[in-house]
Amino acid sequence: MNKLTEEQIQELYTFTHDHFVYHFDLQTELVDHLANGIEVLLLQHPNLSFNEALQMEFKKFGVFGFQEVVEERRKALNKKYLKIIFNFYKAYFTIPKIMLTVILTILLYTTLSSFTPNYQHSIIMVLYLSFFAIAFIRLIKYNTILKKKKHKWMLEEILLTQMGLFSLFQLPIHILNMPVEIESSYFLGLMSFFNVSIIILFYVMVFQIPSKAEDLLEKTYPEYKMTKTL
């Protein structure tokens, strides 16, 4: 079978980009699929040109072109990201890290129990506003780093998107922390544990996972390490 030239492979990368596929990982997968299909067509029909064979292969993707493939990959990587979060997050509820969770819960409970419900609400509000500010700064920093990269990877984009969504997620959390006139240490303890759980989730999503992004990308994409040197 006649293999496509390097120039034709680059044309396929350009073709996928022109058809709204901007992530290098998905471009590579599609280019490989298109190249194999084109090589078979050219073998079966020697009179076909490269462009004619390309259009025939592209029609196989249907009316929406590559978009269904893009959406399927995004769904798969979103599931993968949730699994990554879960694996990092659950470590804080197992020995020995659970001690940190307990200490933070006791510390927050002790602090809140020293104030009236209105002041407790103010403390929580300051806490979440601080989270929002930190997440926003990290979001800008991370986005700046990604823009400088030659290749875009879908998992990296998901890391950035989820960090932004976490910032918006704080609004309903803040509503749950509205002042409640309940003189109950159990209720206050439960609210303290709830807020510490959110603090840990914040740390995992905004600090821990992004700091491990390079390792996660290398495990997800075998070609990632090679592209860093290009």
Image (spheres, helix red, strand yellow):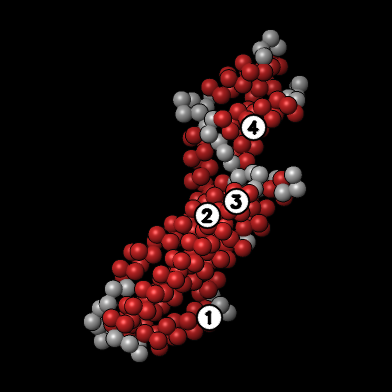
The numbered mark, 1 or 3, whose residue comes first in the sequence reads: 1
Find the residue positioned furthest to the left.
181
Give the residue number, with chain letter if any, for mark 2.
160
Q: Amino acid at mark 2?
A: Leu
Give the residue at x 58% y 79%: 96
32 left or right, relative to 85: right
How far apart, in angstroms, are the residues tagged by discs 1 and 2?
Answer: 27 Å
- Mark with earlier residue (2, 3): 3
Q: Could you say which disc has been placed on residue 132 in the image?
A: none
Disc 3 crowd rating (10 Å Cα; few below 14, some 14-19, many 20+) is: some
- Quote the CA–CA distance across marks 2 and 4: 24 Å
Q: Are marks 2 and 4 in contact (CB under 8 Å)?
A: no
Give the amino acid at mark 3: Leu
Residue 123, image x, y percentages:
37, 79
Q: CA distance from mark 3 to mark 4?
A: 20 Å
Displayed quadrant of residue 2: top right
What percent of the width, then of the height, locates residue 192?
39, 79
227 lies above or below 140? above
Q: In percent of the image, x 64 and y 32: which residue is there? A: 13
Quarter placement of the N terminus: top right
Q: Residue at x 49, y 67 (%)?
A: 134
User: Reading the chain from its start, which is encountered first: label 1 or label 4?
Assistant: 4
Q: Nearer the viewer, residue 223 or 113?
A: 113
Badge 4 density bin: few <14, some 14–19, many ≥20, Cα 10 Å:
many
Q: Which of the marked residues, 1 or 2, is nearer the chain's N terminus? A: 1
Q: Nearer the viewer, mark 2 or mark 3?
A: 3
Residue ID for mark 4: 13
Kindly report which numbered mark, 1 or 4, lies closer to the viewer in this rendering. 4
Dot 2 crowding, Cα within 10 Å, few <14, some 14–19, many 20+ = many
Q: Nearer the viewer, mark 1 or mark 2?
A: 2
Q: Is residue 38 visible?
A: yes
